[in-house]
Structure formats: C-alpha cells, structure tokens
Image: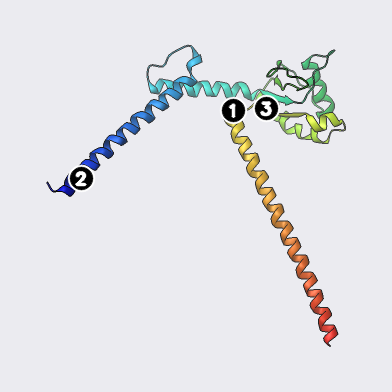
C-alpha cells in the first residue's frame, strides 16, 4: 500500500470514528433533555421513545392548562377588594365583559412598589383568546393608570414567550426601516421639487 493510500485509509477511519462519537453524544444529549423535561411526572422512562412520548404529553397538558389562563400586568391590588373582584371590575368597566373567574394568583415576589403580574384562570380557552383580543382597547382607556400600565396577554410557555419577543423585535425593526426609507424618499422628493423650481426660475431669467 502506498503512502497516499495509507493516509487516505487513516483519514477515513478517523472520520468514521468522529461521526460515530458525535452521533452517540447527540443521542445522549437528546435523551438527557427529554428525560429532564419529564422528571416531575413521577415515572422514569425506560427508553428514549417512552421519554419522547411522555415529554409530548406533558407539553400538551401544559399548553392546554395555559390556554385557559391570561396574565394581567400592571393591575394594582386593592386593600378592600380581592384580585378576582379587581379583575372583573377592570374587564366590565374597560372591556364590557363579565367573566367567571376560576382562580387568580400573583406571580413572583413582592418587591417595593413593583406590581406583581396576576395569573387569571378562566372557564375556557375561547374566553381567554377573546379577552386578549379585546384587551387592545385598554390603550384607549380614559383612566391614565390603566392606559399606561395595564396589559392582558396570553399565558405563554418560556419558549413561546421567547419566540413572541423575537417576532415583536423583528416587526419593530421592519417598521423602523420602513419609516427610515419613507423619510428619505420624502426628503429626496422635496429636494427634487426644489431643484425643478430652481431650474424653472433660471429658465425664466435666461429667457
């Protein structure tokens, strides 16, 4: 066997070994990630397939549970009124809907004057979706505190929240780029108009 053939064979063997190791590592990482996601389910999966199935079911249950809830930001607690009453008062006064609330819970720790977000459980996913759509009216409230501080949003998973944030950033960037383009086109149009007027004036003088 020539030197070149020996080098080629060694390189091929090394590549195969690296590829196999990478595949094994990826499988181990995937299994680890999936089993971690179902660790709280109370049962230990005996195979990767079972772990994946358990993770899918857990994710589906979590989404179904979240679909019936909303997150209200900026709704201040009231000393003489429960959070349920505060929420219902807000939705009736500002949005014209009277909802049956299953539960409410403040999220996070109370720190200074920070208003803790309020998790609200509703009767169905349709009610939650309809409320989020109506909540856009809050930005036109006659109450300045509500108009500036109160928002009602879907109860997203951490991954969904990340994607939603990235989508908002993308839309915001596109709007800023469009405004920049429109502004420069307007300025260019004004400049062209002024140049045309100057040319007409010069032509009149020359004539």
- Residue on which the image places disc 1: 158
Which residue is pictured at 76% across the width and 31% down the height?
135
Q: Which mark is residue 7?
A: 2
* Location of mark 3 (residue): 126
Position of 23 with respect to 192 (left or right) is: left
In the rendered image, which quarter contains the C terminus? bottom right
187 relative to 65, above or below: below
- The extreme right residue here reads 142
Locate residue 122, reporting x and y percent: 70, 20
At 30% from the left and 33% from the top, the residue drawn is 20
Which residue reaches farthest front?
3
**Mark 2 residue crowding within 10 angstroms, few (<14) / some (14–19) / many (20+):** few
Q: Which mark is residue 131?
A: none
**Image quadrant where residue 84 sits:** top right
- Residue 57: give x, y in percent of width and height: 50, 21
Task: Give the class, few, some or many, for how many residues have Cα within 10 Å of label 3's Cα (few <14, many ≥20).
Answer: few
- Determine the image quadrant of residue 7: top left
- Which label's residue is closer to the chain start, 2 or 1? 2
The reply to whether callout 3 and callout 1 are in contact (CB within 8 Å) is no
**In terms of sequence position, does the residue under pointer 2 or pointer 3 come before the other?**
2
């Amino acid at each position: 066997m020539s030197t070149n053939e020996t080098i080629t064979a060694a390189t091929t063997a090394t590549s195969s070994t690296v590829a196999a190791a990478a595949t094994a590592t990826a499988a181990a990482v995937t299994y680890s990630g999936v089993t971690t996601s179902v660790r709280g389910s109370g049962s230990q999966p005996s195979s990767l397939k079972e772990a994946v199935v358990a993770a899918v079911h857990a994710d589906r249950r979590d989404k179904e549970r979240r679909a019936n809830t909303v997150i209200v930001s900026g709704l201040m607690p009231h000393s003489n009124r429960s959070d349920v009453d505060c929420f219902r008062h807000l939705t009736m006064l500002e949005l014209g809907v009277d909802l049956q609330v299953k539960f409410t819970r403040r999220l996070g720790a109370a720190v200074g004057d920070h208003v803790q977000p309020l998790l609200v459980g509703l009767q169905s996913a349709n009610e939650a979706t309809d409320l989020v759509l109506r909540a856009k009216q809050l930005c036109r409230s006659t109450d300045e505190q509500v108009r500036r501080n109160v928002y009602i949003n879907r109860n997203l998973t951490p991954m969904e929240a990340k994607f939603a944030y990235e989508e908002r950033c993308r839309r915001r960037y596109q709007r800023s780029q469009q405004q920049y383009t429109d502004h420069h086109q307007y300025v260019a149009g004004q400049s062209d108009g002024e140049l045309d007027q100057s040319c007409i004036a010069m032509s009149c003088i020359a004539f």
